[in-house]
Image: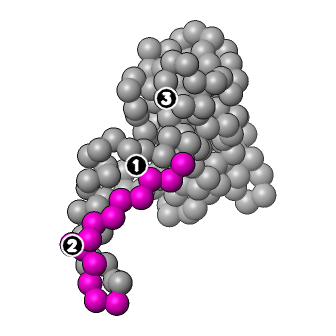
Amino acid sequence: MAIRFVFPVCTLPRGRSHPLCALAQALVLGASGIVPHDALAKAPPLATTVFDTEASAAPGYDAAQVALIPQGTEVELTGEAAPGFLGVYYDGQTVWVPAQYVSLGVRPGIETGVTVADTPLLDAPMPDASALEIILEGQAVILTGASVDGYDAAAHDGTGGWINKRDLSR
C-alpha cells in the first residue's frame, strides 16, 4: 500500500516542486513514523572499507589472512555474520572482515548482534507478525540500523526481517 501526501503550497508553475518543499515533506514523513518496514529490514548489499582491511578465511582475529582490501573499496556483503565480523565477496572469493572496518555511509562500522535465545525473524516489527525463520540462540545477525517499537531491523543468512530487541545482545 503506497501512501501519497500532497502539499499544494509546494507546487511551482508547470507542476514542478519547490526544492525546500521536498525537504519539508521528508521531515514530515520522517517525524510521522511512517516507514516502509520491508525496505528497512533488508540486508544492505554493498559496503565500503574505511581502512586498509585484512580479510580472513574465517571470522576471528586469529584466522588466516587471505587478502588485504584497500581503504575505499566497495565490497558486496554475503549476508553472513559472526560476532564482530561480516562475510563479504572480494576478488572472486568469500572472505571475512571486522565489521568496524566497513561502512554503509559516513559512519564507520556495521553493527552485529547475537541472539540470546531462539528467536523469530519477523516480517514486520510487531508481535503478531509472521516468522520468516527461527534464528537459534547464539547466532550472529547484521543490524541494519532501523528500529521500530522495540524491534531492530536485522538480516540473517541474507534474509531481512525484524527481531525483538530483548532477544539480542550487542
Pick the quarter of the image with the C terminus: top left
Residue type at mark 2 is Val
The residue labelled by disc 3 is: 125
x and y, in percent, of residue 104 in the image: 47, 53
Pick whichever of labels 1 and 3 is earlier in the sequence.
Answer: 1
Mark 1 to mark 2 CA distance (whole Å)? 39 Å
Kindly identify the amino acid type of the residue bearing the numbered disc 3. Answer: Pro
Q: Nearer the viewer, residue 130 or 138?
A: 130
At label 1, which amino acid type do we have? Pro
Residue 168 in sight from this viewpoint: no
Q: Which mark is residue 9?
A: 2
Label 2 sits on a secondary structure element that is: helix
Estimate how packed mark 1 is, as few (under 14), some (14 to 19) or many (20 or more) residues with alpha carbons within 10 Å.
Answer: some
User: Which residue is located at x 42 percent, y 44 percent?
Assistant: 35
Q: Quadrant of residue 116?
A: top right
Region in magenta: 1-14
Residue 108: numbered disc = 1
Q: Quadrant of residue 159?
A: top right
